[in-house]
Image (cartoon, helix red, strand yellow):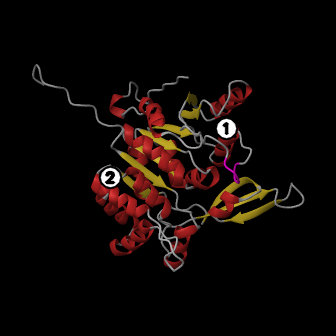
């Protein structure tokens, strides 16, 4: 480099976000503010609404969560905003198309035309000006099965329920979930994305139906354990009615450990207002230590406190997202603050 020349700008960190639904949408909204190289790895077990109907009628991977991830990463230009709004639009009326999302129909059709879901997602990503990618966690549609207590007169008796919608809305207490078929394959492109990542994000979202499923795919959890990326778990702001009613922040971590006992993470991001100082934080720190993680408290909620604020969460992720070529050790640079 000659004297007076400018040094090349550091490359954006490579970020992979795992999840589904509105939780993943929030994470992607923050991650795209930190990097242009963001890949979404999306759950594929939805069996309700438009996605469930298309899955049942056409045998496709449920497209709804994939569509939402595409919308979250779409370029913010006038032309693309029109397409994004169209993809998110749902038909009204009472006919066969009522309730269907336009984007779900396009994804289903494009998958047939292009011969696969990944090719269809890449093509739609190109149309939306996405610089990263949206990928399914598995190349096949999956089902969720849960052991639930509190549905029988005897509170100790467990009942098996099946289906993402049933699990997410159960009035009972979910003890454990499984995927059907058991030991499903992982999407190869998703594995490759995790292997090359600088930062991997898991959560927030429906804990049993959007977050936990990722660690139930053997190849996927193996990739999470082997990657050199910094792994960050983003906790929910509140317990969700149904599947996690009454759950503390600590309980969310124990459930993750129960389903993936060998998985460790580096950081756990917690909204400072959602876990008050005192014994709750003490319990949370002990649970975090079992995962090998540091806890970061920060104001990451929006004004209503129900969803994550993209800008606030991005500020936290920006301090965690350190590209591998800028890390100070062969492993990873670890930072914690309160």
Count neighbours of disc 1 (C-alpha within 10 A) and say few if under 14, some if 14 to 19, many if 20 or more. many
Horizontal side of 195 relative to 143 (left or right) equals left
Horizontal side of 133 relative to 178 (left or right) equals left
At horizontal 47% and vertical 71% (from top left) the residue drawn is 91
In the image, residue 133 above or below residue 281: below
Picture coordinates of residue 336, whole percent (x, y): 52, 24
Picture coordinates of residue 139, whole percent (x, y): 46, 64
Magenta residue span: 240-244
Residue that protrudes farthest toward the right in the picture? 154
Which of 216 and 67 lies nearest the eye of the viewer? 67
In the image, residue 126 above or below residue 227: below
Which of 102 and 184 lies nearest the eye of the viewer? 102
Query: In this view of the protein, can residue 255 be seen by the observer?
Result: yes
Picture coordinates of residue 193, whole percent (x, y): 40, 49
At horizontal 28% and vertical 57% (from top left) the residue drawn is 79
Please state, as top left, top right, bottom left or bottom right, where the N terminus lies in the image: top left
In the rendered structure, does residue 264 fall within the stretch colored magenta? no
Q: Name the disc covering residue 130, or none.
A: 2
In the rendered structure, does residue 243 fall within the stretch colored magenta? yes
Which of 68 and 222 lies nearest the eye of the viewer? 68
Q: CA distance from mark 1 to mark 2?
A: 34 Å
Q: Secondary structure at mark 1?
A: helix
Count neighbours of disc 2 (C-alpha within 10 A) and say few if under 14, some if 14 to 19, many if 20 or more. many
Q: Secondary structure at mark 2?
A: loop
Query: In this view of the protein, can residue 20 be seen by the observer?
Result: no
Label 1 sits on residue? 249
Q: Main secondary structure of the magenta part?
A: loop
At horizontal 42% and vertical 66% (from top left) the residue drawn is 103
Horizontal side of 193 relative to 263 (left or right) equals left
Q: Earlier in the sequence, mark 1 or mark 2?
A: 2
Name which quarter of the figure residue 325 lies in: top left
């Amino acid at each position: 480099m000659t004297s007076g020349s400018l040094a090349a700008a550091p490359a954006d960190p490579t970020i992979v976000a795992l999840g589904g639904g509105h939780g993943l949408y929030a994470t992607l909204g923050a991650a795209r503010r930190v990097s242009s190289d963001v890949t979404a790895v999306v759950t594929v077990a939805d069996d309700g609404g438009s996605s469930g109907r298309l899955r049942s009628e056409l045998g496709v991977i449920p497209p709804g969560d994939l569509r939402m991830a595409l919308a979250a990463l779409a370029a913010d230009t006038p032309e693309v905003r029109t397409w994004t709004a169209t993809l998110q639009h749902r038909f009204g009326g009472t006919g066969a198309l009522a309730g269907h999302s336009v984007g779900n129909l396009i994804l289903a059709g494009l998958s047939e035309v292009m011969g696969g879901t990944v090719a269809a997602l890449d093509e739609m990503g190109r149309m939306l000006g996405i610089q990263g990618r949206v990928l399914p966690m598995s190349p096949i549609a999956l089902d969720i099965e849960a052991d639930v207590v509190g549905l029988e007169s005897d509170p100790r008796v467990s009942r098996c329920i099946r289906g993402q919608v049933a699990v997410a809305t159960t009035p009972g207490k979910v003890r454990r979930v499984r995927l059907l078929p058991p030991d499903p394959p992982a999407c190869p492109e998703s594995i490759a994305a995790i292997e090359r990542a600088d930062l991997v994000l898991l959560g927030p979202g429906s804990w049993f139906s959007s977050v936990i499923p990722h660690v139930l795919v053997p190849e996927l959890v193996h990739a999470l354990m082997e990657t050199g990326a910094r792994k960050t778990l983003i906790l929910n702001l509140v317990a969700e009615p149904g599947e996690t009613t009454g759950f503390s922040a600590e309980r969310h971590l124990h459930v993750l450990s129960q389903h993936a006992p060998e998985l460790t993470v580096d950081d756990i991001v917690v909204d400072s207002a959602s876990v008050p100082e005192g014994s709750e934080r003490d319990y949370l720190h002990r649970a975090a230590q079992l995962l090998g993680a540091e806890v970061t408290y920060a104001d990451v909620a929006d004004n209503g406190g129900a969803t994550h604020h993209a800008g606030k969460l991005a500020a936290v992720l920006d301090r965690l997202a350190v590209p591998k070529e800028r890390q100070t050790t062969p492993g990873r640079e670890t930072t914690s603050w309160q």
